[in-house]
Amino acid sequence: MKLSRLLSVLGADCPREADITALTCRSQEVVPGALFAALPGARADGRAFIPDALERGASAVLCAPPLPPDVNGLAVDDPRAALALLAAEFYGHPARSLTLIAITGTKGKTTTAHMLREIFSAAGYKTGMIGTLGTYVGRTLLEESLNTTPEPVALHRTLRQMADAGCSHVVMEVSSQAMKLRRVYGLVFDAGLFLNLTPDHIGGAEHADFAEYRACKAALFRQCRLAVGNADDPAWPAMAAQTPPGAAIVTFGTGDAQVRALAVEPDPARPFSTRLTVEGAPPYHVPMPGAFNAADALAAVALGRALGLDDGAIRAGLAHTAVPGRALRVPVPAPFSVFIDYAHNGDSLRSLLAALGEYRPRRIILVFGAGGDRPKIRRTDMGRAAAQGADYAILTEDNPRSERTEDICADIAAAIGGAIPTETIPDRAAAIVRALELAQPGDVVALAGKGHEGYIEENGVRRPFSERGVVEGYFRARR
């Protein structure tokens, strides 16, 4: 593509014509003819990598002012927003042929995205999905995710793949960081879905405070033709206030809402499943435990109804939803149950344990740790949640990063404070085996914190690790 055509979307003149073969914001990915976007980062300024990009053959550079002398390209005040517009043009504006659904919230984005993918598929639409667990066409994984919401070049490349594959709908998780870093700048979403907002992602390179976090979430709804929101959440008015004139608004919740949940209860006919009763319809079956999964299902029902989908498709989609690493029940040849869940903060762990407790297990044996190089309040909150909801805790490694697993576990143990029996086994595989050996008929073994992750990160290295593999290996060895 000619550089002049690319820059025209920014209303800018081309300093020197060039054929642009690729876009990238990583100098190590530059190929001859590429446009290199030198973006400001949390750890480094992309401008420092301009010489490397030019040496690798970059034909043009996009950066914040000033443009280095004798370098072809453009300097703009907001290079992140500019890159998003360039990426859309470079890949032929694939979003214009797709129905885009954005999901935002502190918790539940991944589960809700899977529910909506299944609902749209049941309605007969070929559906793409972009989020924490990767990018998918239908149930086929295209690639793993580096970010919940990809950077603009990867995002528009993926949307082009989905459009070319015949997708009509795309469900996207849109994080607060994506909004802050302009990853979806310029996109217009056919619907935006707000789930909830609790303090998280605050500090360091993420958000300065809760007000900034909320503002970034709310900014999404300026780009939505339809806003569907959780009327039970105190932050919903801030989201709704950002919708453009003429945008439709639909609410869901347990109180004053257009789509109202009447009851959430364990499904008596299906172990560790939930029955959700919504006003005006027979109960929906959700094949996962807990009120938090029912809340995500209610959001999916509300959005499906707002888009005019058939209730049969909504019902069928929910009934067939399974989410890797989210309250995932692992089939085991034993008289107890094993669950894997991504719960990696206090609120999520508390919700998981409460959900499992509703089915009245004999005991909940919990295996968990906490991420290193993260605020210590997170591990403290997880310890308190374990003390409230588990019967036995085995503390172990999660992603210790640069910290010692033993030190992290000691902080968690201090928060538990002897409220339940606790032991520390730093090796996670050994900790899981210990839990399986302790389990008796009627118990639940809950493996929390890793979920879908297939690695443990320590000192900058990610070593492969599969919780499910450890569980299955344990029972294979005992056949």
Image (cartoon, rainbow, N blue to C red):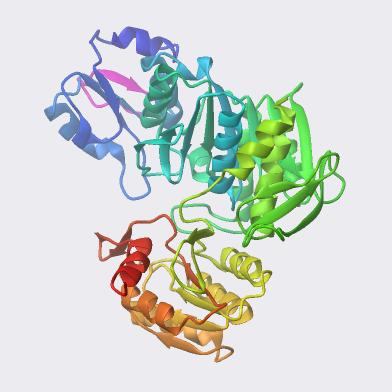
- In this view of the protein, which residue sits in the foreground, 176 or 342? 342
- The quadrant in which residue 158 appears is top left
Instruction: Say left or right for 311 vs 423.
Output: right
Secondary structure predominantly adopted by residues drawn in magenta: loop
Q: Quadrant of the C terminus?
A: bottom left
Residue 238 sits above or below residue 153 on the image = below
Seen from this angle, which residue lies furthest front? 479
Instruction: Say left or right for 245 vs 157.
Output: right
Residue 239 sits above or below residue 154 on the image = below
- In this view of the protein, which residue sits in the foreground, 448 or 75? 448
Residue 312 sits above or below residue 450 on the image = above
Residue 227 sits above or below residue 61 on the image = below
Q: Is residue 74 magenta?
A: yes
Give coordinates of residue 334: x percent, y percent: 46, 72
Residue 403 visible in the snapshot: no
- In this view of the protein, which residue sits in the foreground, 21 or 182? 21
Residue 445 visible in the snapshot: yes
Instruction: Say left or right for 452 vs 296.
Output: left
Give coordinates of residue 411: x percent, y percent: 46, 82
Give coordinates of residue 465: x percent, y percent: 30, 62
Q: Which residues are magenta?
A: 65-76
